Image (spheres, rainbow, N blue to C red):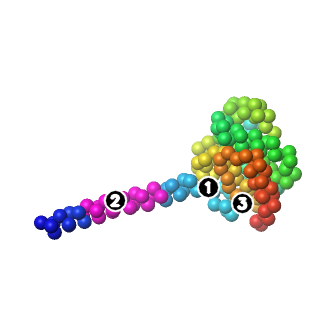
Amino acid sequence: MYHRSTRKSFAMVSLIVLCTVPVVLALYVEQRRIFDPLPVGQKIPSIEALSPDGDVLVQDSLAHKKLLLLFFTTACGHCRTEISNLNELRAKYVTEIDIVGISLDGRQATDALKEELNLKIPIFLGDNEKVKSVFRLTILPALYCIDESQILRRYSSGEHSLAFDEDLIKEFIAMKSVR
């Protein structure tokens, strides 16, 4: 009797392990794919966005100097703080770095935000689902520091202080470009 009970227990534990391990492994792999941003040191994917005037953002037109690319939504309070910080820092670093925003919202909401915050940085409209997929956006705002060769040099997400953003810009400007 004892032997049969041990075999049943062993079979039950084996079944649980055999069913649980693949599920846990699959969830881990999927979580890593979802929450990992684009790999630093790799060329960024093609950017597809429109200006509020309907002009297409051409990625090659951004390759003349370093680029800080901000993805945001208009209703996100953290995004509003981040874009305000970058708008304030833009004038100070305009000769060394381009700062461009890509809104994941529609034209009307984006235009209202530009007016409300008196934004001077160029803002483009991105296709929400496509941009999120291509750039692996899960947390907004998302900052991508891209060098002249269109290599991702740094990634940061979430709201930051003005001092943090300025330090990030200074550090990025000081980085040697990958050619």
- Number of disc labels: 3
Q: Is residue 44 visible?
A: yes
For mark 2, give the secondary structure.
helix
User: Which three-letter amino acid code belongs to the residue tagged 3?
Assistant: Arg
Relative placement, left or right, of 155 versus 9 is: right
Task: Identify the image quadrant of residue 117.
Answer: top right
Across and down, in percent, residue 114 comes to 75, 34
In the image, which residues are magenta?
A: 11-28
Chain-order first, disc 2 or disc 1: 2
Across and down, in percent, residue 3 comes to 16, 69
- Residue at the spot 34% in from the left edge and 59% down from the top edge: 19
Across and down, in percent, residue 38 comes to 63, 57
Main secondary structure of the magenta stretch: helix
User: Which residue is labeled 1 in the image?
Assistant: 37
For mark 1, give the secondary structure.
loop
Tag 3–tag 2 contact (CB < 8 Å): no
User: Which residue is labeled 2 in the image?
Assistant: 19
User: Which residue is labeled 3 in the image?
Assistant: 153
